């Protein structure tokens, strides 16, 4: 079993290391420029997701907390306070805040981990950087 793991690791290292030997300089420069362009597109898309998620989170928390806190029973607490709040609106606000939090998470982690898909004349390429 140990020999099998060593052989698989050696084949992976050999396969990944020899992929960079071929090709000429012009193709390498064009590929680097193309990857830089797709990286800037990914970061602008992820920034939009982060800002949209922030707006949803803040709005959802504001609506949810105000719906749960405002009981409209007056200034002093009394028996039956839990039935005086708007539970459906509070739950909808907290669900919206959760969705905003998910958008923030995906937007902040998407730029580094998502694969780059490039469509050109007669080709579609997908590149993904693997780290070990």
Image (cartoon, rainbow, N blue to C red):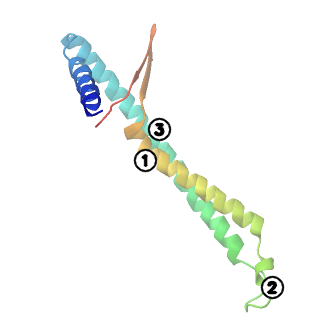
Find the distance from the CA under tag 1 to the CA under tag 3.
10 Å
Q: Is residue 21 left or right of residue 65?
A: left
> Quick one: which residue is furthest to the top in this view?
122
- Asked which secondary structure carries label 1, the reply is helix
The residue where tag 2 is placed is 80
Q: Residues within 10 Å of mark 2 (few under 14, many from 20)?
A: few
89 w.r.t. 69: above or below: above
Labels 2 & 1 near each other (Cβ < 8 A): no
Instruction: Indicate the position of residue 95 as horizontal and vertical percent values.
Output: 65, 58
- Asked which secondary structure carries label 3, the reply is helix
Of the numbered discs 2 and 1, the one sitting upstream in the chain is: 2
* Residue 4, quarter of the rendered image: top left
Instruction: Indicate the position of residue 22 as horizontal and vertical percent values.
Output: 21, 11
Image quadrant holding the C terminus, namely: top left
Q: Residues within 10 Å of mark 3 (few under 14, many from 20)?
A: some
Instruction: Indicate the position of residue 107 as horizontal and vertical percent values.
Output: 47, 45
117 w.r.t. 104: above or below: above
129 vs 36, nearest the viewer: 129
What is the number of the mark on residue 45? 3
Find the distance from the CA under tag 2 to the CA under tag 1.
43 Å
Labels 3 & 2 near each other (Cβ < 8 A): no
Q: Residues within 10 Å of mark 1 (few under 14, many from 20)?
A: some
The mark lying in front, picked from 1 and 3, is 1
Q: Residue at x 79, y 85 (%)?
A: 73
Q: Residue at x 21, y 18 (%)?
A: 18
13 vs 5, nearest the viewer: 5
Of the numbered discs 3 and 2, the one sitting upstream in the chain is: 3
Find the distance from the CA under tag 3 to the CA under tag 2.
48 Å
What is the number of the mark on residue 26? none
128 vs 58, nearest the viewer: 128
């Amino acid at each position: 079993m140990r020999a099998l793991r060593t052989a698989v690791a050696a084949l992976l290292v050999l396969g990944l290391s020899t992929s960079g030997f071929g090709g000429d300089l012009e193709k390498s420069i064009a590929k680097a420029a193309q990857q830089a362009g797709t990286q800037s597109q990914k970061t602008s898309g992820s920034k939009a997701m982060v800002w949209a998620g922030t707006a949803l989170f803040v709005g959802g928390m504001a609506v949810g907390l105000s719906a749960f806190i405002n009981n409209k029973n007056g200034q002093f607490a009394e028996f039956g306070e839990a039935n005086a709040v708007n539970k459906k609106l509070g739950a909808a606000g907290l669900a919206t805040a959760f969705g905003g939090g998910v958008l923030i998470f995906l937007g902040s982690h998407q730029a580094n981990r998502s694969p780059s898909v490039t469509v050109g004349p007669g080709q579609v390429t997908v590149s993904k950087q693997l780290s070990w």
